[in-house]
Amino acid sequence: MGNQKRIEEERKPRVLCLHGFRTSGEIIKKQVTTKWPESVINKLDLVYVDAPFPSEGKSEVEGIFDPPYYEWFQFDKDFTEYRNFEECLEYIQDIMLKQGPFDGLLGFSQGAILSAALPGLQSKGLALTKVPKIKFMIIIGGAMFRSPAVAENAYSPSSPVQCPSLHFLGETDFLRPYGEKLLELCVDPVVIHHPRGHTIPRFDEKGLEMMFKFIDKIHRLANDTSSVHEKVIEEEEAAVYM
């Protein structure tokens, strides 16, 4: 009975969800909630937000999902030069300050590329310096930044991404080769393979089992950190009265 009460009192991991290029927070919410079972969604506190910049061109989802559409930053045809990248980082930090604290990130496509870079940039003091450390990331259809200036700070063989990570790799996803390279720069990544392309996939039985195991892991991380934080507060309060 006591153990059940403890479980009920533990909070769900709070996850900031970053959508794909020229889509929106509402779109990724629909993509997740229509494809993932409630048994997964109900274990996470998912927060969906829009990127800071209105779409500067045609969206690939026009006719499938309604506008407005947004983008996190702009880039050249080789994906090596970026515009409004620093502004994007500041925007995400502002969201985390106002709507957090967040435990981890979930990203799809451009949002996944961004999510995968943030833990490393944060660890080097180059992003998210005013918010708690990112504890995990869920990367769907992701890849690495191609700009050496960003990539060297975000991830490298000598400084891989340390936080737990779950990666969805689609068999026919055009970003799959780049997503596989990202795996090499993450410590102990968990990989769910699916037969689809560049999309948020449904789960097969094996994938669902792996997802539940990952959720159990990040649930412990989120609540262990809470316990430590509460202990610090209790000690500080006790010191006041001593």
Image (cartoon, rainbow, N blue to C red):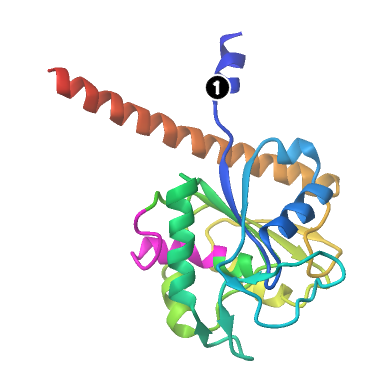
x and y, in percent, of residue 171 in the image = 82, 69
* Quadrant in which the N terminus is drawn: top right
Q: As rendered, which of 80 and 193 lies closer to the eye?
A: 80
Task: Residue at 49% x, 70% y: name it.
Answer: 88
Magenta residue check for 116:
yes
Task: Residue at 41% x, 73% y: name it.
Answer: 153
Magenta residue check for 40:
no
Classify residue 196 by image quadrant: bottom right
Outermost residue toward the top? 1
Q: Which residue range is magenta in the image?
A: 115-130
Q: How many marks?
A: 1
**What residue is disc 1 on?**
9
Classify residue 68 by image quadrant: bottom right
x and y, in percent, of residue 79 in the image = 59, 86
Label 1 is placed on what type of residue?
A: Glu
Q: Secondary structure at mark 1?
A: helix
* Quadrant in which the C terminus is drawn: top left
Task: Residue at 58% x, 72% y: name it.
Answer: 53
Task: Residue at 83% x, 49% y: name it.
Answer: 34
Could you tell me if residue 196 is visible in this image? yes
Position above or below: 89 against 40: below
x and y, in percent, of residue 228 in the image = 37, 32
Q: As rendered, which of 180 and 1 lies closer to the eye?
A: 1
Q: As rendered, which of 232 and 164 lies closer to the eye?
A: 232
Position above or below: 80 against 150: below
x and y, in percent, of residue 234 in the image = 29, 23
Packing grade of label 1 (10 A; few <14, some 14-19, many >=20) is few
